[in-house]
Structure formats: C-alpha cells, structure tokens
Image: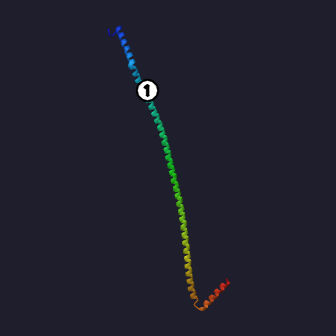
Amino acid sequence: MALVTPDIGTIFWMLLMFTILLIILKKFAWKPILSALNKREKSIEDSLRSADRAREEMIQLKADNEIILAEARLERDNMFKDTKQISEKILSESRLKAHEEARLLIEATKKVIENEKTLAVDEIRRQIAGLSVDIAEKILQEKLKDDKQQKELVNKLLQDIKLN
C-alpha cells in the first residue's frame, strides 16, 4: 500500500526532481524545440504561400494563354479571310483579263475575216470583170464580123458619148 499512498518525503523528492527536470529542459531543450517548431511552422506557412502564389500564377498563365490563343485564332481567321479575299481578287482579275483578251481576239479575228472578205470580193469582182470582158469580146467578135457592123457600133458609141 505504500505505493498507492506515497509518503510526504516521496512526494517532496518527486516534486523537486520534476522541478529540476523542468528547469533543465527549459534552459537547454525547450528553446531549441520551440525554435525548431517555429521554424517548421514558418517553413510550412512559406510553402503554403508559395503554393498559393504558384496556383495564382498558374491561373494567370492559363488566362494569358487563353488570351494568346484567342488572339492567335483571330489572327489566323484574319489571315484566312485576307487570303480568301486576295484569291477572289486574283480570280476576278484573271476573269476580267481573260474576257478582255477574248474580246480583243474576237475583234482581231473579225478584222481578219473582214479583210479576207474584202479581198475575196475584190478578187471575185476582178474575175467577173475579166470574164465579162472575155464574154463581151467573144460576143462582139461574133456580132461584128463584118466592117459595116463595126462602123455602126462605133458611130452609135460616139453619139452616146457626145450625149453624155
């Protein structure tokens, strides 16, 4: 039963030892332990702040990336639009040029055809005139075989000339 109900002397020595232990711990161990705990707490807080800053930076970077992507898409769309406009313009100019060249070619062809037609008509006229002269000569030779008929024709032609 002595252990269940301690003596006053035992309580005194236990309190004295406990106090000495507390003083020794306070002098040598308490400050380094508290300092280590404070350092640990501070490093944890710094790490949390760094993580928060990193998260905020990531959010900001993500927002910046979205803005850059939107600008890139807009620029790409503008480039496609400009390219389409340029190609349509080139196509339109090519069509106009082709129409103009076709018109000039048609006009040149018409002129060539007209010239050829004029030359052909002139040639036909020359041939007709030559044939007419040949026919007239043959007819006259047939009709005017004797001198009397020739003199009558010459007189008649002279009278027609004088009348005109």
Residue furthest out toward the front: 27
Mark 1 — residue? 42
**Quadrant location of residue 117?**
bottom right
Q: Is residue 4 left or right of residue 152?
A: left
Frontmost residue, 125 versus 71: 71
The percent coordinates of residue 73 (x first, y second) are 49, 45
Frontmost residue, 42 versus 130: 42
Residue at left offset 55%, top offset 71%:
115
Frontmost residue, 60 versus 120: 60
Residue furthest out toward the right: 163
Mark 1: secondary structure? helix
Residue at left offset 55%, top offset 81%:
130
Q: Is residue 116 left or right of residue 33?
A: right
The percent coordinates of residue 76 (x first, y second) are 49, 47
Relative vertical location of residue 44 with respect to residue 153 in this rendering, above or below: above
Frontmost residue, 5 versus 150: 5
Residue at left offset 37%, top offset 12%:
16
Residue at left offset 56%, top offset 73%:
118
Q: Amino acid at mark 1?
A: Lys
Residue furthest out toward the bottom: 147
The percent coordinates of residue 157 (x first, y second) are 64, 86
**Quadrant location of residue 32?**
top left
Image quarter hosting the N terminus: top left
